[in-house]
Amino acid sequence: MVGGLRWLTVVTMGAVLLSGCASRMAPAPIESRTIPGASAPAIKRAGGVPSAPAAAPARPSAEAVSGPTPDGFYRIKRGDTLIGISLDHGVSWRDLTSWNQIDNPNLIEVDQLIRVRPPAVTAPASAARAQESRPMEVRPIGPIASAPTSPPAGGGPAAAVAPAPSVGSAPAPAAGPQGGPGAAAPRPPVAVAETISLSWPGRGQVITQFADPGYKGIALSGAEGDPVLAAGDGRVVYSGSGLRGYGNLVIVKHEGDFLTAYAHNRSILVSEGQTVKRGQKIAELGKTDSEIPKLHFEVRRAGKPVDPMKYLAQR
C-alpha cells in the first residue's frame, strides 16, 4: 500500500513538471503597438543628431549642378562678392541684382550661376504674338471726312484726318525711315570704343607698376587728404567699402566697356548714379586697407584689368 502511494506521488509530480516546461516553451502571442498614422522613429546619426526617415533623394537645382558655365554667366566661388564680380565683368552690381532677381546682394551661394551680361530682349517677339492673338476690331462703315480747309485755332498746321477703316480692313503699315510703308528699320549697333583718353587721377608719383598677373593697376604716392580726381567723364557705379582689400572705393563707368577704380580713399565725395566730369574731385586720398597712404588706380575694359599707363595722358 505504501509502495503504491509512493509510485502515484512520483507520477503526479512528473506530470506537473512536464506541464510547466510545456507552458514555458510555448511562444508568446505577438502584440501590435503600432499607432495608426504615426511616422517612423527618427534615427540618430553619429554625433547624436537625429535625422529624418530616409526619403527619395531630392533633385539638385540647376544652379547647384556643376558643369560648364554657359556664355554670359558666372559660377560663384568661395570668397566672391557681388561687388568684386561686377568689377571683374565691367558691369554695375545693381545690374547684377536686377538681371538675377537678387533681393539681398550679401546673400550669394557657392556654385550659384548668375548672369553677368544683360538678357536678350524678347519684347518685340512677345508684342508680335500678342498682336496676332488680338481679335479683329470691326467698325461700322462711315463717310470719309475731309481735311479742314482752314488752320485750327492756335495757328498750328492743319492735321489731316485719316479715313475711317472699312470693315475687316487691316491697319495701315507703319512708315519706314524714308516715309514708305514697312516696319521701322532696326537700330544700328552701338559702336564700342576701342580706346579712351584719361587724365591723371592724382598728383603723386607712380610707386607700383601694373603687372598681369599680379598688381591690377598702378599706385600713386600722396598724403592723406590729397584730392582724387575722376580720370574721365562717366557715371559712378559703385561708392563704398564692400570689396575686401580696396578700402573706400569708387568705380566710374566710361564710354564703351571701360571702368576706372579708385581705392584706399580716406573719404568719398560722390554717390552711386552720379555723373562726374574729367578732373572732378571725387574722393580724398587715404590708407583704408593699405599700410601707407596711396591711391590705387585701375583701368578695366570689359572687366579685364589693363595697364593704365597706356591710357593716361603724358605729364
Image (cartoon, grey):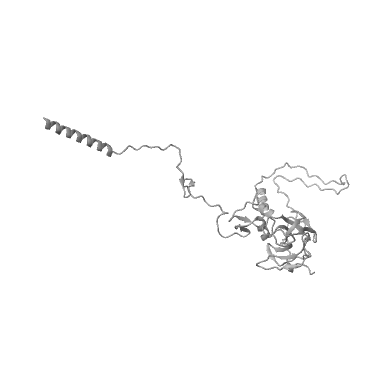
Can I make out residue 122 in this image? no
Residue furthest out toward the right? 155
| Residue 69 quadrant | bottom right
- Observer-nearest of 69 and 231: 231
Residue furthest out toward the top? 1
241 up-or-down from 12: above or below = below
Q: Position of residue 179 (x, y in %)?
A: 77, 56
| Residue 216 quadrant | bottom right
- Observer-nearest of 203 and 69: 203
192 up-or-down from 102: above or below = below
Can I make out residue 304 in this image? yes
Q: Position of residue 237 (x, y in %)?
A: 72, 56
Q: Position of residue 66 (x, y in %)?
A: 55, 58
Residue furthest out toward the left? 1
Q: Quadrant of the N terminus?
A: top left
| Residue 311 quadrant | bottom right
- Total numbered badges shown on the rendered structure: 0
Q: Quadrant of the C terminus?
A: bottom right
Q: Position of residue 307 (x, y in %)?
A: 71, 67
In the displayed structure, does residue 181 sit left or right of residue 79?
right
- Observer-nearest of 112 and 160: 112
- Observer-nearest of 170 and 225: 225
